[in-house]
Amino acid sequence: MTVQTPIYTEITQCQDCYKCIRECPIKAISVEQGHAKVIPNLCVLCGHCVIVCPAGAKRVRDDLPRAKQLVKIKEKVFLSLAPSFASEFAGIPPEKLVAALKKLGFAGVSETAVGADFVSSDISSLLNETENKIAAGESGVQKLFLSSACPVAVEYVKRYLPSLVDSITDCASPLLAHVRFLKNQFGKNCAVIFAGPCIAKKRESDVWQQDLDCVISFQDLKKWLQDEGIRIEACTGNEADKFVPFRAAKGALYPIDGGMISSVRKYSGMDNCDMLAVTGLDEIGAALRGIEPEKLTKPLFVELLACHGGCVNGPLASNNSPTLMRQISLLKYADSAKDVTSEKEIPVMSGTLPTEAAEEIKHSESDITSALRSVGKFTLQDELNCGSCGYDTCRSFAAAMLEKRAEKGMCVSYMRKLAQKKANGLIKTIPSGVVICDSNLMIIECNENFARLMGDQIMELFEAKPGLEGAELSKITSLSKYFSDVMSADGPDVVDHEVREGKKIFHATIFSLEEGQSACGVIQDVTAPQVQRSRVIKQTQRVIDKNLAVVQKIAFLLGENAAETEATLNSIIESFAGNDGDANE
């Protein structure tokens, strides 16, 4: 059975803004036919694209229907509630929350932080063992330890920092440890659903299907309560409405940066071990890329969290309060918890997400150069590195094009130049005179036909300076006043006017290009023979149309006369059109 990826793109909603590419720390997004799509084998499910997409085109797989079905068909279903619930449901007593959730059909509600306590105990033992080995003078002892609690961080290191894979602690995530514990406690046949702010937990559910049955978000949980008409505030919790089988200890601190370290230290002081916390994928990359573990003089444990500030800022968290307030809510809840758990029935603690390293594709200089030239970048100065395409540099964009992850249309400077070339080509070939000017009536651009209409002197100026950029329109033609009209605040959008200049009569259509900033005029000499024929034809056709409209109303009176009149007028058109094939155009 094919399982939909946890993050996907709703193509019809994608607005081609490329913001997701700009914001994605690993550029795990490709563009196909103008639409940005997540690349599953590169994505680590940090969910940042979901947060920043202005059109809401980046979607998260909806597992709420599956969760509802599990509650109906399974005899016992337990909810593993992420420790960040203390910030998501701030101010709500746990008893009330548990009572409300049990009304959804859950046999019990348990804190995922219980699994975090098991992880803290396991990591503490590992670091103590390492300290003892170093003290005993053993050689070749591993000194760098990267936490495996955050699935996004684990996937990031395994995909993009493969040289450090062996430094990841072989310890199950808090969620996986908790689920295994619950099934040991309540039977293998029970189902466990996780609710929290993390999208990557859905990947854990896909991989560890025998342990974790379903993953939903806090938002899903709130919607579920709303659908069932359950108000948490109206619930009265009692002695039976407690977390099962017991409350978590300082594992409740895991959702904030440094929380895991604080929890681990409760199990052992770690006097001879350095412990640091790094949050955010960019920061993780900057902190670890190029590190040489063999040069460490004592054990270093690094707590890695993909979300800035910790899980309280997860992609599916409700960001309706400042980060500090969310962290304070969580700290307040964790303060009342025990320091360590006394539980002895620790589940199997091994296992991290199986992830293959991302293939590093190298391109030759000639291929990069060729790709750059395809978007009009022939020199180093052409490489603007503006980032509008989503990539930090033009060379990165060129590499993405070679890998079929990007399209030429993503380059704004290239598209601007292309549009300008097309516009210039149209202006040059159009048979009428065309002139564009700014709000100061200074010419921005014009074609040769405009200069020819304005007389020999202007034509000479055009030959010396094609386009007449910077020339004053008011010194060339009296039509300039109509350009001022369409650019004025209360002026018309379009002016259609005829003006006599010398022996010529100009028909001008002038319209605004940028409101109050620029205007364009299309000008014809109506005294020119070809234009005269065209105008007579158009006017005659207009008479025919009007005549036929009248005929339709009084056909029973003027049937024969109408047909005769139409034939006469058509003969006029033919006589004026002559053999000039362009007359009707």
Image (cartoon, rainbow, N blue to C red):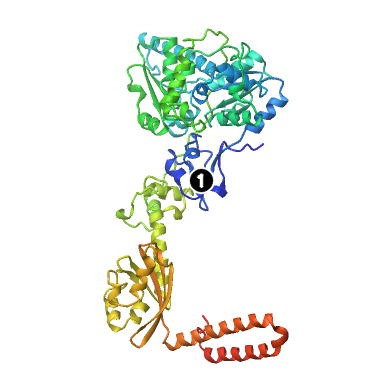
Q: Residue at the location (45% across, 17% down)?
A: 332
Q: Is residue 231 above or below residue 118?
A: below
Element at label 1: loop
| Residue 578 visible from this viewpoint | no
**Looking at the picture, how far across and down is residue 138, in whole percent?**
38, 12
Q: Quadrant of residue 114?
A: top right
| Residue 584 visible from this viewpoint | yes
Q: Is residue 25 above or below residue 386?
A: above
Q: Is residue 115 above or below residue 490?
A: above
Q: Nearer the viewer, residue 581 or 90?
A: 90
Q: Nearer the viewer, residue 136 or 108?
A: 108
How many marks the image carries: the answer is 1
Q: Residue at the location (35% across, 22% down)?
A: 294
Q: Is residue 471 above or below residue 290?
A: below
**Looking at the picture, how far across and down is residue 425, in whole percent?**
41, 70
- Decide: few, some or many residues near mark 1? Use Cα within 10 Å; few <14, some 14-19, many ≥20: few
Image quadrant containing the N terminus:
top right
Residue occupied by mark 1: 55
Q: Quadrant of residue 24?
A: top left
**Looking at the picture, how far across and down is residue 431, in whole percent?**
43, 78
Q: Nearer the viewer, residue 486 or 116?
A: 486
**Looking at the picture, how far across and down is residue 281, in whole percent?**
42, 32
Q: Amino acid at mark 1?
A: Ala
